[in-house]
Amino acid sequence: MAKTKTVTRYVKAKRRRSKGGFTLPLAAIGGFIPMVSYAYDVGYKGEGIKGFGKQIVYQTTGFDTYSGTWHWEGISRGLGPVILGLMVHKFVGGKLGINRMLASAGVPLIRV
């Protein structure tokens, strides 16, 4: 009787991208800087924390709490840079792949 040989086959494991840890998207955060700085300069320096809150509400919703009316320039001043920063983050990170390059280069915490 002939003996059978055992054949061992090795299968390559598929490469998987592991999800990274905490990162800061600079373009998305940078969109909030004009809103917060304007609210600080106009609201906080003028009326304190109450004025700061009123300016944040005005810039995110367009509602002027002083007169009780809606203004589009409030929304454009506050949310315009935020939306622009999110679009830059989406284009640069998704289409150009800069965030993946930063991750593969080993740059910690920072993404565009």
Image (cartoon, helix red, strand yellow):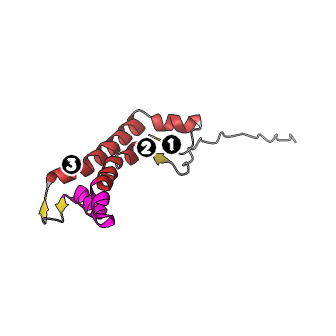
Amino acid type, residue under disc 2 in the picture: Leu
Identify whether 98 is placed above or below 21. above
Circles 1 and 2 in contact, beta carbons < 8 Å: yes
In the rendered image, residue 85, in percent from the top left (x then y), is placed at 34, 43
Query: Mark on residue 110?
Result: 1
Left or right: 1 as drawn, with respect to 107: right
In the rendered image, residue 49, in percent from the top left (x then y), is placed at 33, 65
Secondary structure beneath dot 2 equals helix
Amino acid type, residue under disc 3 in the picture: Ser
3 vs 1, front mark? 3
Number of callouts in the render? 3
Reading the image, the residue beneath label 3 is 76
In the rendered image, residue 97, in percent from the top left (x then y), is placed at 44, 34
Q: Closer to the N terminus: mark 1 or mark 2?
A: 2
Gap in angstroms between the C-alphas marked 3 and 1: 28 Å
Q: Closer to the N terminus: mark 3 or mark 1?
A: 3
Residues rendered magenta in the picture: 42-62
Magenta stretch encompasses residue 85? no
* Mark 2 neighbour density, 10 Å: few (under 14) some (14–19) many (20 or more): some
Left or right: 4 as drawn, with respect to 90: right
Foreground: 66 or 99?
A: 66
Identify whether 11 is placed above or below 79. above
Left or right: 11 as drawn, with respect to 72: right
Amino acid type, residue under disc 1 in the picture: Ile
Gap in angstroms between the C-alphas marked 1 and 2: 7 Å
Secondary structure beneath dot 1 equals strand
Secondary structure beneath dot 3 equals helix
